[in-house]
Amino acid sequence: MVDNAAMAAVDEVRAFNRFYTRQIGVLEEKLLSSEFSLTEVRVLYELANRNEVTAGILGRDLNLDAGYLSRILRKFEDLGFLKRSTSASDGRQSMLRLTTKGRRAFEPLNRRSCEQVEAMLAKLSPSAQQELLRAMADIRRHLGDAPRTSPFLLREHRPGDLGWIIQRNAELYAREYSWNHEYETLVVEIVTRFARNFDPKRERCWIAEREGDRLGSVMLVRESESVGRLRLLLVEPHARGLGLGRALVNECIRFATEVGYETLTLWTNDILVSARKIYQAAGFQLVEEKPHHAFGHDLVSQEWQLKLPAVRQIPQPLQGS
């Protein structure tokens, strides 16, 4: 007997596959208006993003038939895109590396692919873009995509990031803690003050990112000549468990120490348990606690401090955990 629910699920997955292959032009004989097929461009991408690799590892990672991959690699050699050398650790193996000519051929393909995706995303609102990216991450995770060796990178803020910080703080705290518009108003004030008075020598805003998807953020602002304040630590729900919060806080500590602050402070509320654990692990001490009513709830506010001696072991900048 046919399971109707299972068949409906199969049909939905197949419909999605047909839609997305049309969306990105996979059905075209040559990809991105080039002379190369989808598989050839995929092989070029892997070669361009690795210093060197064996054909065996490349075939395994791409799940390609050895004979098919061999023909592609031969074509690339004939075009002058690929160079082989004997492995230093195993003389029986050849290492593959893109030549300068191969990288020049790959660059316009990579650029056109990025432009294609940017055009697709440009049709969506910022919130819809984030929803789409989270859904894609969920699909990859549920279908067994291997974890990345470098799950995220940290970068300084750029245009568009501050608006995203306001939006995501308001949305997440409303959803997870039912905080009302008062919290969004506070975030707007903090971000606006940062933008208007930004001192790049003494202040920073970091964005945690993975493949263009913002995963979290934090700010370090100047409170006085000797005191810096950590503000608006945020980690997206689908990115929790990567060590991202710890990395953002450690980056604040590193920068605060480097520019000569003596103390790093922060304000939070006792219900933010996960954040408080990160602060405690980083060495912050709770120095003040008091009940207050804010954001539509009775809360307990907390002030935390971290002393930053002139000589200390500075956490190194993290590009991933």
Image (cartoon, helix red, strand yellow):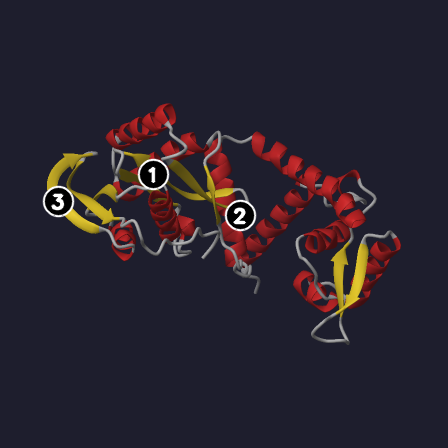
Question: What type is the residue that disc 2 sits on?
Answer: Met
Q: Nearer the viewer, mark 2 or mark 3?
A: 3
Q: Nearer the viewer, residue 143 or 192?
A: 192
Q: Earlier in the sequence, mark 1 or mark 3?
A: 1
Q: Nearer the viewer, mark 2 or mark 1?
A: 1
Query: Compared with residue 210, is residue 119 higher up or lower down, i.e. above or below?
Result: above
The picture places residue 131, in percent across and down from the top left corner, at 47, 40
Query: Compared with residue 68, is residue 138 higher up or lower down, i.e. above or below?
Result: above
Q: Secondary structure at mark 1?
A: strand
At 72% from the left and 76% from the top, the residue drawn is 90
Q: Earlier in the sequence, mark 2 or mark 1?
A: 2
Characterize the local packing of mark 3: few (<14), some (14-19) or many (20 or more) Cα atoms within 10 angstroms: some
Q: Nearer the viewer, residue 50 or 133?
A: 50
- Is residue 37 among the parts visible in the rendering? no
> Marks 2/3: CA distance?
41 Å
Q: Are marks 2 and 3 in contact (CB under 8 Å)?
A: no
At 53% from the left and 58% from the top, the residue drawn is 148
Which mark is on residue 289? 3
The picture places residue 118, in percent across and down from the top left corner, at 61, 34
Question: What type is the residue that disc 1 sits on?
Answer: Leu
Lateral position of residue 75 relative to residue 266, left or right? right
Question: What type is the residue that disc 3 sits on?
Answer: Glu
> Marks 1/3: CA distance?
22 Å
Q: Earlier in the sequence, mark 2 or mark 3?
A: 2
Which residue is identified by label 2?
A: 136
Q: Nearer the viewer, mark 1 or mark 3?
A: 1
Q: Secondary structure at mark 2?
A: helix
The picture places residue 157, in percent across and down from the top left corner, at 45, 35
The picture places residue 211, in percent across and down from the top left corner, at 55, 46
Which mark is on residue 83? none
Which residue is identified by label 1?
A: 220
